[in-house]
Image (cartoon, grey):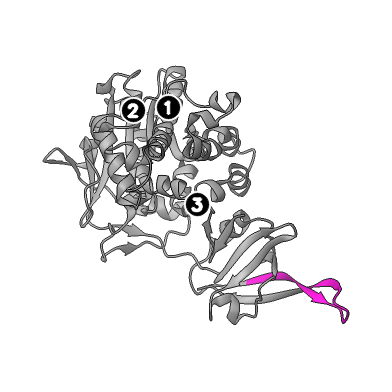
Amino acid sequence: MYKFILGLFIAPISKLNSLIVLVIMSASLGLVPVSAATLNHRSPADVMQFLRTYQPNALMGKQTIAFNELIQRLLSKRVILVGEIHDRYDHHLNQLALLKALHAQDPNIGIGVEWFQQPFQPVLDAYLAGRIDEAEMLKRSGYYERWRYDYRMLRPILVFAKEHRIPVLALNAPVELTQKVAQGGLEALSEAERAQLPKHINPPEGSYLQRLRKVFTSHGAHGASEGRFENFALVQRIWDETMAANAVEFLQANPRYRLMVFAGTGHISDRMGIPSDIARTIPAQQLATVMTNTVGDTPMGQYDYWVLSPQPHNLPPTGKLGAWFEMDPRGLQVIKLASNGAAERSGLMKGDRLVKLNQTPIRTMSDLLRILAGFNVGDTVQVTLERDRLAPKGELNAPLLMTVAIKLQ
């Protein structure tokens, strides 16, 4: 069963799956300097206004080059892989800045993103074509169940793509398959499931293998069996190979297009992972890798170019209700309250079920997180909830429907 805390998703995954997640999450720990700047970007228009005067310098080897020169150099490449630490807003701003500048020079460009899994490509296509709205896209793609990071950081990129009719590829492998592989290897997949992945999953070698083993052992897996490490490394390679295969398929089907790939640094740095997999089909000299380098950051591997940012940029924190939730057959149910938290101070009780937030129906955690993303700490929202009532003999009466105001924490 899934549980949610303070509006943040926590899934009950195994220790090995937790460790696999750390391949991409561990790079985020302890890298943000204290002097981060908060940008109150409430809409994509605010972001585009910010980017009008945002042209950071770049680093090529030891040589500093202007942003415009970086763009001219990237225009000679067919595949541009831009690394990210997933919860860093400044990294996503740089991705959009590069996309915007490259598109202005050549509109024949697509983007491939790690954030969505390949089976949900039709959902992304429907959103980009205007057949469904953003809320429906997030719901149908399972964004808050499958990716979980603050969607506000990604929205400006997808809005820009939609406005300029830029193809967006859902590159990633389905989590259902990678979780099975984490536990039992490729043999755990059915024939139909195995067919959803690239035919060949090349094992990690050399320094890439050493890097994965270092991650594996540094997170408490010293006594784990070799088989567990093999599955751990295999899942990483499934992510790499799947994203590379989907990128190559697009490039072969669209010979006049270039492609930008937005993915975690663990999949791109040192030209390992996705770049080396693509280079089996697309000449390596047609590829370039780019990463953000902010003062105070620890370098995450080697890249062809670094975008230099004087300080990280954050969004204001979203408001939280101060409660733990889980899905119940009757709705999203409160299972625990933070002591003296926002929900408890407003009178919520364990067992209450959320019905609406500011008159918007709440049926899933995805609904709740999507709506809360529009509110900051200190904002007040109206929460409608159901509360069970017991008759004198212990039978359940019709639930009490009530609305309370909660000042988000």
Say which amino acid is labelled 2.
Answer: Val
Q: Secondary structure at mark 1?
A: helix
Q: Residue 355 placed where, x, y %? A: 71, 64
Residue 129 falls in image quadrant: top right
Q: Are marks 1 and 2 in contact (CB under 8 Å)?
A: yes
Mark 3 or mark 1, which is nearer the start of the sequence? 3
Residue placed under numbered mark 2 in the picture: 79
Residue placed under numbered mark 3 in the picture: 148
Image: 361 above or below 16: below
Left or right: where 105 falls relative to 362: left
Range drawn in magenta: 382-400
Q: Secondary structure at mark 2?
A: strand
Left or right: where 17 falls relative to 268: right
Image: 170 above or below 332: above
Residue placed under numbered mark 1 in the picture: 247
Say which amino acid is labelled 3.
Answer: Arg
Residue at (24, 22) in percent of width and height: 285
Residue at (53, 79) in percent of width and height: 339
Mark 3 or mark 2, which is nearer the start of the sequence? 2
Residue at (64, 41) in percent of width and height: 132
Q: Nearer the viewer, mark 1 or mark 2?
A: 1
Say which amino acid is labelled 1.
Answer: Ala
Residue 43 visible here: yes
Q: Secondary structure at mark 3?
A: loop
Q: Which mark is residue 51?
A: none
Q: Residue 278 placed where, x, y %? A: 35, 24
